[in-house]
Every structure is written in C-alpha cells, then in structure tokens.
Image (cartoon, rainbow, N blue to C red):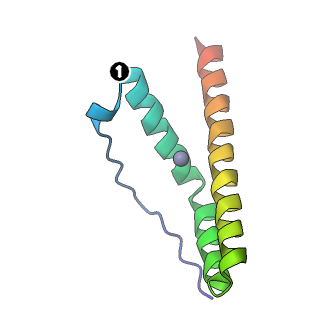
Amino acid sequence: MTFVYPYRYAKIRIDPAQHDDEADVVHSLRHELCHLVLAPFDHAIKVVERILEDDGTAGRAFDEAARFVVEECIINIERILSEQEGNSQ
Ligand SMILES: [Zn+2]
C-alpha cells in the first residue's frame, strides 16, 4: 500500500450568499483550514474504507465514526484558536 499525502494545496470556495456576515465567512474559512490540518487522518480513513468496502455494515459504521471524530477534532482546534485570539487581545 502506498501512502500518498492528498493535500499539497487546497482550493477553498466560500459562497458569500450562504453566510450572514464577515465573521461567519471567517469562521467557515477557519473550519475548512482545520480540515487541512487533519488531512492525514482523512487519508488514513479513506485507506481503511477501501479495506472495508466489501463489508457494508462495518464500512458504514467506520465512516460514521470517522466523520464524527474528524468534526469533533476540528471543533476542538477551533476552540483552541478562539481562546488564543481571546488571550492575544
Ligand atoms: Zn467540517
């Protein structure tokens, strides 16, 4: 199995019509940047999903657990960043 790191660059598109104000846009951008930090986990998740693709039940359970873990990690990173912003002002 060859490990190919999936992100060398990323293009993030933000639709201003989907956001209430500048702060909401910045929040969305920060959230998407946090996904880049966790990109190695996303890659590992895809590898395991390929291993489990013949087992629908295990594959779906793993996918649900993996998505939950990644989003929870992002929420925690966002909290850390928010606390740092609060401490630097
Ligand atoms: Zn997310």
Q: Residue sitting at 62 percent across and 83 percent down? A: 53
Q: Classify 30 as above or below 3.
A: above
Q: Residue sitting at 69 percent across and 37 percent down? A: 76
Q: Which residue is labeled 1 in the image?
A: 21
Q: Residue sitting at 66 percent across and 22 percent down? A: 83
Q: Classify 63 as above or below 67.
A: below
Q: Quadrant of the N terminus?
A: bottom right
Q: Quadrant of residue 51?
A: bottom right
Return the x and y of residue 9 as percentages of the image width and height. 40, 59
Q: Classify 40 as above or below 24.
A: below
Front one among 25 and 33: 25
Q: Quadrant of the C terminus?
A: top right
Q: Secondary structure at mark 1?
A: loop
Q: Classify 39 as above or below 58.
A: above
Return the x and y of residue 67 as percentages of the image width and height. 63, 56
Looking at the image, the residue that sits furthest to the top is 89
Q: Quadrant of residue 86?
A: top right
Tell me which amino acid carries mark 1. Answer: Asp
Return the x and y of residue 55 as percentages of the image width and height. 68, 84
Front one among 12 and 21: 21
CB at disc 1 and ligand 1 closer than 8 Å: no
Q: Residue sitting at 65 percent across and 70 percent down? A: 60
Front one among 31 and 49: 49
